[in-house]
Image (cartoon, coloured by chain):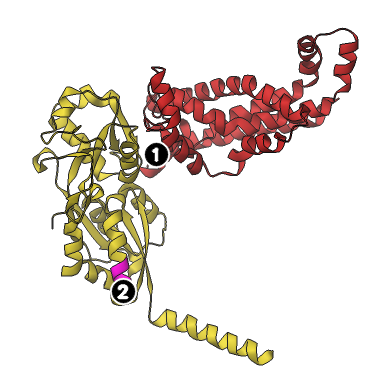
Amino acid sequence: MLSDVDLAAVWLTLKLATITTMILLIVGTPIAWWLARTGSKWKGVIGAVVALPLVLPPTVLGFYLLIALGPHGPVGQLTQLLGWGVLPFTFAGLVVASVFYSMPFVVQPLQQAFEAIGVRPLEVAATLRASPWDAFFTVVLPLAKPGFITAAILGFAHTVGEFGVVLMIGGNIPEKTRVVSVQIYDHVEALEYAEAHLLAGGMLLFSFFVLLALYSRKGTHTWK
Amino acid sequence: MKARITRLLIGWALTVSSLATQAAQVQVAVAANFTAPMQKIAVEFEKDTGHQALLSFGATGKLYAQIKNGAPFQVFLAADDKTPAKLEAEGDTVPGSRFTYAIGTLVLWSAKPDFVDDQGKVLKKGDFKYLAITNPKTAPYGAAAIATLTKLGLFDALQSKLVTGENVSQTYQFIFTGNAELGFIALSQVIVDGQLTGGSTWIVPADLHEPIRQDAVILAKGQDQPAAQVLVDYLKSEKVKAIIESYGYGL
């Protein structure tokens, strides 16, 4: 069965995807809310920036992250100033990269959910003297729940499937940055096909069932 | 109009046929440490012979796996002698075509001046966060780095500081960007025309690891491909030997 090294890679991947998804739900919600509501001329710009990882090759993102997060880059200078050291080759670095990389997969479903709700329920809530925060938690969140579930599943699954960025800034350190996709690549490169099959087959099944769960839900829920 | 199209077609046919008879292409798999010299050699090769060398770079182990799985490479320039020998034993090469084109030199390099001393004592001090190496499973320079650390008795102490590049080019990039303070790479990556390009370097003594004999071989797909043979002969020429030596390789 799976060796200790492989199991460590699986565990690390799940940890990375879980933390990334949680951060993205927290960070992505206000961004998605703003995108859904705003009439600002910046809407297009911010929307485009968020969507960039959809079209950019991971090598571009990985390259810029390596430079920006490195000791001579702007972010690297800042993190060193704060005493955090530099982020490449660390788990925290992978989390930062994954947040960028998976951002559109969380923000876009949330934005669609918020747009589908429209302004009417909030206006009604306001006439009933609900504060904006109150209205958000008691009206928007329940109505947008299917959107949140979709966003969480997509964000999690996409982070699990991340490869190029991790390869470029991870440094392949066991239990810190060696995620499943990198471990599979290593196995394939070293002609360890049996080990590669176990992990690759696992990934295939995982991805299929995630998407199956997602698409099976879609029909049963409709936005209100 | 019709005549013009005919003329165009004839012209096109002539171009294609002349390309096919005169300038052939040869697909070459090249170990990443040999990237810079091979790019230079390929330019000269095209000038001198009219043939074109299409280069693919990667870790030797990865290129081996690709060759075993039907990659269209006709010539293979590996970073060791074991991989070409293995391909020969497995019948994937043109018998008798294997030869040593360069002997590689392992260096410990930092992008910072004065960081690496010329005795490699910086390793013992351990005053750094990351030491970059190349994947020892697939890259001979990575295996030589591990052998060196082991021979120095420092492997256990430094193991937790190792970061691994996928091939020596990526390892160089980790060090060059300063994300790893220092690392083991090929001398050829930090030398141009016999001059070190910058940073600080320790040339690892050859007795600390197995010699890095880099062998080339014509692959089965290069059989009866004249350009493949021309390239191999060209690699053995004095002109190319001088280029190879200018990148710090032994011969």
Against B112, residue B94 (above or below) is: below
Q: Which residues are magenta?
A: B43-47
Q: Which chain is yellow?
A: B
- Crowding around mark 1 (Cα neighbors within 10 Å: few <14, some 14 to 19, many 20+) is some
Residue A106 shows up from this direction: yes
Residue B198 is marked as none
Report, in whole angstroms, how far the alpha carbon at label 2 lies from the one at label 1: 40 Å
* Residue ID at (35%, 65%): B74
* Residue ID at (21%, 62%): B98
Front residue of B100/A53: it is A53
**Quadrant of res A104:** top right
Against B189, residue A168 (above or below) is: above
Left or right side of A158 for B32:
left
Left or right side of B172 for B191:
left
Residue occupied by mark 2? B47
Rendered hue of chain A is red
Q: Position of residue A173 (x, y in %)?
A: 36, 28
**Quadrant of res B181:** top left
Q: Position of residue A83 (x, y in %)?
A: 38, 17
Against B89, residue A166 (above or below) is: above
- Is residue B45 part of the magenta span, yes or no? yes
Q: Position of residue B51 (x, y in %)?
A: 35, 74
Residue occupied by mark 1? A187
* Residue ID at (18%, 39%): B201
Q: Main secondary structure of the magenta part?
A: helix
Q: Quadrant of the C terminus of chain B?
A: bottom left
Q: Given the image, what chain letter belongs to the residue carrying mark 1?
A: A
Residue B228 shows up from this direction: no
- Circle 2 SS class: helix
Left or right side of A111 for A61:
left
The amino acid type, in three-letter code, at marker 2 is Lys
The amino acid type, in three-letter code, at marker 1 is His
